[in-house]
Amino acid sequence: MKDQLLVIAIIYLALEAAEQFLLMLNLKHLSRYGGQVPPGFEEHVDAATLTKMRDYTVAHGRVDMIETVLSLGITLIFLFGGLLNRLNNLIAAQEWPPVISGVLFFLILVYADTLLKIPFSLYNTFSLEKRFGFSNQTLGLWVQDLCKSLLVNTLLLGFLLYGILLLVLRLPQIWWLAGWVFVLLFSIFLLYVSPYVIEPLFNKFSPIENSSLEERIREIMSRVGLKINRVFTMDASRRSSHSNAYFTGIGHVKRIVLFDTLLANHADEEIIAILAHEAGHWKKKHVLKMLIFSQTLALFGFYAAYRLTAGDGLAQLFRLDIPSMHAKLLLVAFIGSLVLFPVRPMMAYLSRRHEKEADNFAVQLTQSPVPLANALIKLGKDNLANLHPHPWYAAVHYSHPPLAQRVKRILSAKAMVPREREGMA
């Protein structure tokens, strides 16, 4: 047992070391090439901006390294140093019902994780982000967001955990299947209610005042079969000057949300190109494909959890005095994160491929590569994106193609494929 536990610890340390190596490689690559202006960016980015982009990425990278090392140490102490056993014994001593004990067990871990991350959140928000001109957040607003997030997470996670643990208790032979269905339905439910119940707790949404832009958005979205329910602007500038836009809704009816910072800094054509890109994700069924892929993995994960928790082998391996189901599920999640580590680059690759397809779709729909390219360049400049990520780091971590490569490809003849007629009439 000791040898097996040592092997697991070594694998964990090796994977974390690989992460740190990639991060350092990325920062070193940036320091070497960060002063070079990529093709297509000449009119938008000068030497001072490049320096700011480099410094912003380096600053975040250093904080990430410190946070990772701290997290690694706490994980080792908790899982391999006996803290998990102590917490498990403490909860068992209260003699609460198994489901309640499990919910409280996981909520304690969530609260502890939140507490440990507070110093990093404060530093990032009020030092790093302010230093680079992004953060507009006040301490009062930050505290409000923290309290609201804890409340929402407690309610949602508490309900989810209660349902799963109840199924484990009531359906011991098929809880893995019932639990998977329960989580899937709960996730779909959140997609429906989040825009109307959860998101308004943190931001104010109002119809955009630019009626001409709204009409153009509706017209171009209708050409691909999308009906736009409402087009809203969100008061993102209360917290940050970062820009973004997104769709919500399931099926053909969508709700579009534009950050007020995006409306302030981008021309109408650029905003339409960004939304055309999002429409491409829907038209190409990227969300559905990724959902099927992730849910297939989740189903295998639930079954693996069922098999691994059927006996007390995990509890004995990690030297637990009491083989509680909630502790064994936590250990399964930890081991699963190690096993699935190689899947991350594959997921990132699929996502980048989808982004390329959506870019092509947007160019075809708007009949010009320039608005989308300009929009991405502005987003990169405004958000101080890393224009020179190391290829290995990007392969593992980037869900989108590196920005400089992406803009170059969009502006090239390769992006100008023949326009697809289906669904665009």
Image (cartoon, helix red, strand yellow):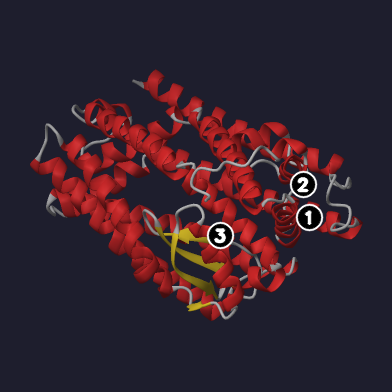
**CB within 8 Å, label 1 to label 2:** yes
Looking at the rendered image, the disc whose residue lies closer to the viewer, 1 or 2, is 2
Q: Quadrant of the N terminus?
A: top left
Q: What residue do we see at 54% from left, 47% from top?
A: 280
Q: Amino acid at mark 2?
A: Leu
Q: Which residue is mark 2?
A: 387
Q: Nearer the viewer, mark 3 or mark 1?
A: 3
Instruction: Give percent across and percent down for residue 269.
Output: 68, 63
Q: Does 349 sit above or below residue 6?
A: below
Separation of residues labelled 3 and 2 (CA atoms) = 31 Å
Which is nearer the N-term, disc 3 or disc 1? 1
The alpha-carbon separation of the residues under discs 1 and 2 comes to 8 Å
Q: Residue at x 30, y 48 (%)?
A: 87
Q: Residue furthest left?
A: 170
Q: Which residue is mark 1?
A: 53
Residue 339 seen anywhere in this rendered image of the structure: yes
Q: CA distance from mark 3 to mark 1?
A: 34 Å
Q: Is residue 315 above or below residue 74?
A: above
